[in-house]
Image (cartoon, helix red, strand yellow):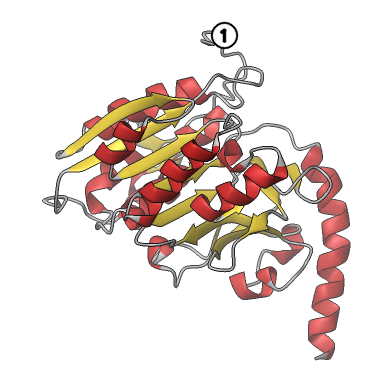
Amino acid sequence: MKHLYLYLLLCSVGWLLAADRGQKAEPRPNKPLSKSEVLKLTGDWKGSKLSRDIRILWLYGPEDHGGGEHDYIRVKELFVPMLKTIPRVTVEEAYLFPSKEQFERADLMIQFLHLPDLTDQQLEHFQSFVNRGGGVVSIHESCIIRPLARAEKLAKCIGCSWKGNRDSHWGKFSHDHPLFLKTDHPAFKGLPGSVRLNDESYWSLLKREEVEVIGTIAPGKENAEASFEDVSASSAARSEAFWTYSPGKGRVFGTTTGHYTYTYFDPIYRLLLLRGIAWCLHEDPAPFMPLVFHGITSEEGLVGTTDRMLNYRNRSR
């Protein structure tokens, strides 16, 4: 018990320091990894096939930050063509919010945008989609909607939502702050206990009871050797970095990370998202694994990018 108290105290001290460093963290991609190293995580996908035809709906909106941040359109233009390369996958796009007919056609919706003030009817369509068995992958700011009454309804659909500027928090985090994964969850089974990114996340969200947090950002580098359970037990950790939620017959895989565009060119981040997509669809992740390497593998066999992508100018509104 004495050791537990000491651990929590150290976490609290580490968090005070990490919070300051996190807000000031410089955008910096991970160093590219060797293809052989990444293959250890993806496994062999040769001969793997989806069990059925999959219809994906990609929901996006206008960018609302500087170049290289919240690039909703650029990320959509990156992932939609990639997803279409997977046999038996079709992808449809929706701007701001899908129609009822689009929901009816989809098996999975991937959302990366700042949601508008949805009407009660739109939220009902969203809830019906998930309840009947639709899957949702919610990325970064997609969990934010105002006012709070709308946030509560959004949380019923995806599990977590922004509680308000006084109660929920946001901040950058650096490579000094490990992202711990719950590897006994099927979505992350077989992956390392922690990974490192340089991005932004939200925490202290409005969270439904059925939500299972499967990714938590540690208070600081002094926690590098801790376990997911230890980090999650600390109130200083940034929870809700990744979560799952199963309302009705549907499945939701959510993350508050994904702020910077370069993050989507990182093989580890792609791996996490693709594992989430497969979990939502009740599919083996193997058929999605080629996308971990798609377009980011050099002739030297390195996977990733060193480009911060902050000078992106071709932005549509």
Residue that extends furthest to the bottom in the rendered view of this protein: 1
Task: In this rendered view, identify the residue nearer to me: 165 or 156.
Answer: 156
Q: Quadrant of the N terminus?
A: bottom right
Where does residue 124 sit, x and y in percent of width and height?
A: 46, 44
Number of numbered discs overlaid on the protein picture: 1
Task: In this rendered view, identify the residue nearer to me: 116 or 278.
Answer: 116
Q: Is residue 140 left or right of residue 304?
A: right
Is residue 35 in sight in this rendering? yes
Where does residue 254 sit, x and y in percent of width and height?
A: 51, 50
Is residue 293 in sight in this rendering? no
Q: Residue at x 85, y 65 (%)?
A: 12
Q: Quadrant of the C terminus?
A: top right
Residue that extends furthest to the front in the rendered view of this protein: 121
Quadrant in the picture for residue 184: bottom left
Q: Circle 1 sits in a helix, a strand or a loop, which is it?
A: loop
Q: Residues within 10 Å of mark 1 (few under 14, many from 20)?
A: few
Where does residue 220 sit, x and y in percent of width and height?
A: 75, 57
Quadrant in the picture for residue 92: top left
- In this view, 112 is above or below 3: above
Q: Residue at x 64, y 21 (%)?
A: 64
Task: In this rendered view, identify the residue nearer to me: 240 or 307.
Answer: 240
Q: Residue at x 51, y 10 (%)?
A: 316
Q: Is residue 156 left or right of residue 23?
A: left
Residue that extends furthest to the left in the rendered view of this protein: 47
Q: Residue at x 73, y 33 (%)?
A: 26
- In this view, 106 is above or below 210: above
Name which residue type carries label 1: Arg
Where does residue 8 sit, x and y in percent of width and height?
A: 81, 74
Quadrant in the picture for residue 140: top right
The residue identified by callout 1 is: 313
